[in-house]
Image: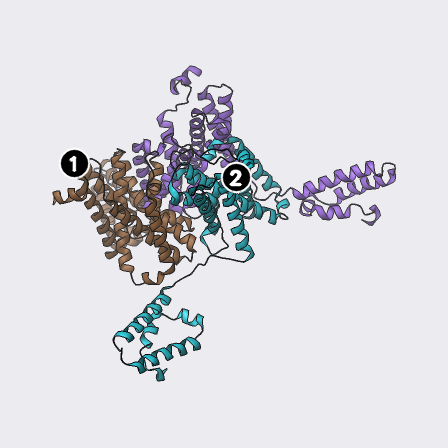
Chain colours: A cyan, B purple, C brown
Amino acid sequence: MEAWLQGIFADTPVLTVPWSIDYFSVIAGVLTGALFACDRKLDIIGTVVCGLITGYGGGVLRDTLMQGTGVYFTSHPDLIVNCILICAFVFYFRGIFKHLEATVFLADALSVGLFALAGASKAVAFEQGMVLSVIMGGITAVGGGAIRDICVGEVPGVFQRSNYYAVAGLGGAAVYVVLARFGCPLALAGIACVLAVVALRYWSVYFDWRTTSEADLTPRIARGLHRVGEVLSGLFLHGGDSERLQRHAGARIARGASRDDEARKGSSGGSDAANSDWPANMR
Amino acid sequence: MEAWLQGIFADTPVLTVPWSIDYFSVIAGVLTGALFACDRKLDIIGTVVCGLITGYGGGVLRDTLMQGTGVYFTSHPDLIVNCILICAFVFYFRGIFKHLEATVFLADALSVGLFALAGASKAVAFEQGMVLSVIMGGITAVGGGAIRDICVGEVPGVFQRSNYYAVAGLGGAAVYVVLARFGCPLALAGIACVLAVVALRYWSVYFDWRTTSEADLTPRIARGLHRVGEVLSGLFLHGGDSERLQRHAGARIARGASRDDEARKGSSGGSDAANSDWPANMR
Amino acid sequence: MEAWLQGIFADTPVLTVPWSIDYFSVIAGVLTGALFACDRKLDIIGTVVCGLITGYGGGVLRDTLMQGTGVYFTSHPDLIVNCILICAFVFYFRGIFKHLEATVFLADALSVGLFALAGASKAVAFEQGMVLSVIMGGITAVGGGAIRDICVGEVPGVFQRSNYYAVAGLGGAAVYVVLARFGCPLALAGIACVLAVVALRYWSVYFDWRTTSEADLTPRIARGLHRVGEVLSGLFLHGGDSERLQRHAGARIARGASRDDEARKGSSGGSDAANSDWPANMR
């Protein structure tokens, strides 16, 4: 197995994926970008540009941030020609893709995984450290789609409550970087990266895992801190007053039972704090 | 003529346009950008930034993609000062430009042509190959305007159904790259490039040539394929049944005559396919 | 004082601020970006990206324009980790920052000042000339916030009628560049830069100084030019006709008294010109 992989992936300290895999990921990205542009009623120029941005944008962003390491976009002109032809094909034959949603979803997930791998492996090859390598993987994976969304005046989908997408890209990049750091053969690490991204992407849609757009833990923490303070003050200040301590405990249990979780979440920690010293019989 | 051109344009393997031409194109771009900003009620900072983005954005994008070849923006500080002064002038005296629409249109067309030339000739000089050279010409020509549109939250005009703009820029760049490739003196190729852009831009407005935002050839192709199949099946399977073949042909002619072209375009290939085997007398 | 400053700031021809100051400015920028993202209901990915863009975007833009001088973002991975943790903290404990508006405002003003200093001093160190140094200071100061606004589909605040923000950044950068040019110790120039930005920012809010979004001086200038012409023509053409000259003068005074300033501003210079030769008694 290992020998077979070595046959496919060059056995160098730097992971070199076959050009066909790079080409596949760019083409899948270009395809989704062109379909996106068709949905927004852009013209042929807009479709080609959106396609190229989706396919190459993340890599260009990575190469701009990693100044002086070469730009992937300009190093493969033949791929650009193919991408433009694909965009034109999508523009004129969009009807074909209406019935290929599942295929496009799979191609997109694979492409995000391969982009994450391309970003992370280039950063690892240029010895950017683990943190930057994971970030470069994430940027390469979803940067193209984000720039495309910005170009048509929308808030990037990856910035909003949604199924895992950037999370999948970052997760895959992290898998690659950690495995590469601990001496795993780069070919295996790369396969694990792509599998992780595809699995995360499919699971997140299947189980409807979503990022959340609102999360304010302040009231919960405030209430928690208040209770710690309450218990501590009960122990130290009213150490001998066992009756009062029991009243406190009883009140807390009663309160926990009568209020449902949602309502408690909404109430501020402050009002909780103000109430908690009232005698239990007044509640 | 050739000698006179050699006097204007330096006789090197790299096309060196006089600085005054570069300056003119940037200033024309800055002017249109500043007028655009005034229309959107931006303040003086927004006007200056929009002007500079329109004038320099395409070049910065090209220089970012062609890593390590120098950035035009930072190499001519005196031009930047002039551009800022022009933006301020437009901001405070916008009333003057209300009556200069035709002049601004000409300046803009010339500037797009000169930008396309600047982008293509720089890419040719750095031996980026024909494909990238044309793309760099197009990016330099319309990239600034596109970035400006994105910056004020609009979908770039060049992405939408409109008169030729990006098409003109790409066409001019292609003219330059092809002529340069086939040994034409670079000065002549440059003039042809600018003329091509200006001509395409004016013609597209004069004849109202527009890019299209919707084009789905799938039904047409499906119908075409179906007919090919029909004819083939007629030939091979019902080879001897000449009456049936004639019925088919007659039905097709009658159908073509009774339906107007638009209605046929709208109908899906599928329904066509479903109908086409009915006996002719049932239609 | 000077000696004490030399202890803090390295005594080199290039201003080297302590890393803690750079870190503070990035972290303050990241903080404001993350709070901005929470207001727009972005998810954790969007919050982290908006934070990083606000903190690093201006610097990345500067480093892209100053090709080949290194990218600050990729040179301090430990700072990125801290920034991501801060964004996550803001995301989950946004409630805390509701009562810290004045502190956030101060941190933001300080951060803009320090960004302006970082941009201007890097450009000065790479000998980009005074014009570019001021522009780089301004770009570094407010570029991050502008890119963040663009990323969520809004017109950047600095492009619109608002309290001084870009003006403050540019002003501070200009103070630094001018002081550095005239041989002032770089440490002192840096402090003056930051103080200038913070002072301009606070004053602009305190005195409600705002940039204006509309300013068309054309009618005013046209009227002014017309009057100059009127006086000149009175002097040269009707030199001996003292009665007519006095009528002109009287009419102008009467007109000035009867019309209020606002109305005069609205009328075009043209109508003024048409009226001004009527006999005074017909008015």
Three-letter amino acid code at disc 1?
A: Gly
> Which quarter of the rendered picture does the N terminus of chain C lie within?
top left
- Horizontal placement of B28 versus B161: left or right? left
Q: Position of residue A69 (x, y in %)?
A: 40, 34
Callout 2 secondary element: helix
Examine the rendering and report whether any part of residue C112 can be seen: yes
The answer to whether residue B156 of the structure is visible from this angle is: no
Which residue carries the number 2 mark? A26
- The residue carrying mark 1 is C183
Front residue of this view, candidates A30 and C278: A30
Classify residue C185 by image quadrant.
top left
The residue marked by circle 1 belongs to what chain? C
| Label 1–label 2 contact, CB within 8 A | no
Q: Residues within 10 Å of mark 1 (few under 14, many from 20)?
A: few
Cα distance between the residues tagged 1 and 2: 53 Å
The amino acid on which the numbered mark 2 sits, given as a three-letter code, is Val
Q: Residue at x 49, y 45 (%)?
A: A193
Q: How many other residues sit within 10 Å of disc 2, few (<14), some (14-19) or many (≥20)? A: many
Q: Is C43 rendered above or below residue C71?
A: below
**In the depicted view, which residue is nearer to us: A105 or C270?**
A105
